Structures are given as structure tokens and as C-alpha cells.
Amino acid sequence: MLITCAAYRNGEKLADISVETISEYVCQPDCFVWVALANPEPAELEQMQEEFDLHPLAVEDARHGHQRPKIEEYGNSLFAVLHMIEESGSELSVGEVAIFTGPNYVLSVRSRAHKGFQEVRTRAEREPELLKHGAGYVLYALMDAVVDRYFPVLEHLEDELEVLEERIFANSSARTNIEALYGLKQRLMIVKHAVGPLLDGLGSLSGARVPLMCAGMQEYFRDIADHLQRLNQTIESVRDTVSTATAVNLSMITLQESEVMKRLAAYGALVAVPTLIVGIYGMNFEFMPELRWRYGYAITLALMAALDGYLFYRFRREKWL
């Protein structure tokens, strides 16, 4: 589906144009066309391929989707794939945006993602001095918008981790905690898979040798690389904390089991002492001492109570009970 199609010259918007008139603008000097598609049909991609002379392999990747984040150079054009991560309740949904960039065009193809880039277009049109850089600046603006959307997602994962860490020491279900930590780690890896490959790919846009359309934009792409580096460091930190929290949770399970075993052993000892005394007096011998003692029954009960009381006191003192 076509979202917008507009022509720009020297940082100023000329007009919203139809797809059929794209060829009239791309051949003009200092002019470029910015087209945005969302979940396009194959026929729409084929039409864009004809208008902008897109590389067949890049078009194939955009058509099928599910690509690893990357930045590839095809002659004098660039093809970038970025993951768009959106929160859906407690889950993360992963969409894609494929960006075709040439000297006189920018084509963004958004798939399986709800939030578009209208605010990016609005911001770019408010900054004509930057928009004069042409397609290279639009590529930066789109990539910067996608990367900036990773920060709140990661912040929510950090907040969730803090809640889980508190739950570990609040006598909550250990199994529930481990399941929640594992789910958090899975969502963290989704962000990791979006950030890591893109950080590697940005080296071709922020180094000494850059494509001609990105000349003079190295500082801007280095800014994106800096954001990605911060994200990557945060992801590694959170992942280490998740692993530590999981280990602590397992240790808490072991401690709980140890406490249960100590309690069972203590109660077993409280039962064993009276059982020993009663067992002795339960033997069926004809001649046994104190069998005809008048106060024997009461004293025996008192002795059992005293011994159990002493054991109970010692167990409580050692925090076994």
C-alpha cells in the first residue's frame, strides 16, 4: 500500500506526486523522490523496481522479509534492512523496514509493523538545511527513528527485571520466577538480534570510505552507531543480570529445600525421643524395673515432655523450627 510519494529539491518539498510521474522528477538535477510503502503487494514492488532500477536481489529480500538487519551496497545505491520492535502487551512483535536509497530516491518498505514514519518526514521537512543532503539524510533520519524506538523497549525490560528481582526474595513461586526470567531473556535476545548486526553494518556508513550519497553525513551515522553501542552495552548488562537472577533464584530453591529438610529432621527428632522411651516400656518381659512404681507413668510422661521441650528449644535457637 502506498503511504506517501513526494518530490524534494534543495531541501524543499516540491509536491506530492503520483507513482506514474516519478520518472519525471528523478531525472531532474538536485531533486529526489521519497516514497513510503506499507505491506506492499508484489506488483507495487515490481513497479518501484522499474521506476528506480532497484537491484533484483534487494527487491527479493524486501518481498519475502524475515531478513537479518544489514546494510548492503549495490553499485551507487544502498539497501538497508532494520527490525522494527513493537510492544504488544507483554510480548514483542518484530516487523521490518527495508530502505532502498539511491542518488535521487529513497524508498521505504514497511512490513508487519504498525507505526510508520510520518513524524520522520515532518521533522525532515522542518530542517531544510539538513534535507539538502538529499537521500543520504533521509536514510539517516529513518535509521535514527528506528534505533530510537529501541530505547523505551529496553527500558521496559529493565523495569520488568527489577520487579522480578524483588519477587525472588519475596517468597513467591520459584517456578513462576524462572519462567518469567526466561521469557524476559527471550525478549532481550529479540532486541539483541536487531541491534548487533546493524551495529556491524553501520561501519560502512560512518568510516573513512562511504557511499557518495552519504558523503558529509559520517558524523550523523556515527551518532546512530553510538546509540547502538549504548543499546548493546545495556543489553549485555541486563542479560548478565538475568543470568545472575536465575542463579540466585535456583539458590533460593536449594535453600528452601534445605530449610524443609531441617524442619523434617527436627520434627523427626521430637517424635523419636518419646518413641524410644515408649518402645522400652512396651517390651513384654516379666521382670522389668519400675513396673510396679506408683508414679512411674506420670514421671515417664514428664520425662518425655521435658526432653522434647529441651530439643524444641535447641532447634528453635538454631532456627531449624
Image (spheres, grey):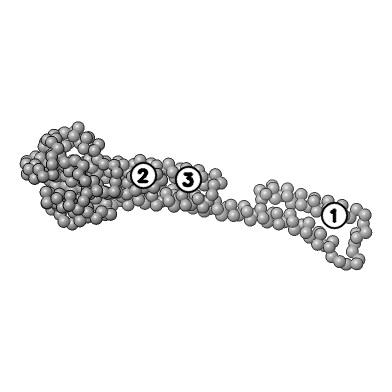
Q: Which quadrant of the figure has residue 139?
A: top left
Residue 115 visible somewhere in the drawing: yes
Mark 1 is surrounded, within 10 Å at the Cα level, by few (under 14), some (14 to 19) or many (20 or more) other residues, namely: some
Q: Residue at x 39, y 47 (%)?
A: 91
Q: How many numbered discs, if any? A: 3
- Contact (CB < 8 A) between labels 2 and 1? no
The amino acid type of the residue labelled 1 equals Thr
Where residue 89 appears, x then y in whole percent? 40, 44
The amino acid type of the residue labelled 3 equals Leu
Q: Is residue 257 above or below residue 38?
A: below
Q: Quick one: 22 or 249, which is closer to the camera?
A: 22
Could you tell which of marks 3 and 1 lies nearer the N-terminus?
Answer: 3
Where residue 191 appears, x then y in whole percent? 34, 48
Q: Is residue 153 left or right of residue 266?
A: left
**Which residue lies under the disc numbered 2?**
87
The amino acid type of the residue labelled 2 equals Glu
Cα–Cα gap, marks 2 and 3: 19 Å
Q: Secondary structure at mark 2?
A: strand
Front label number (2 vs 1):
2
**Which residue lies under the disc numbered 1?**
300
**Which residue lies under the disc numbered 3?**
164
Q: Secondary structure at mark 3?
A: helix
Q: Is residue 114 left or right of residue 91?
A: left
Q: Residue at x 56, y 46 (%)?
A: 171
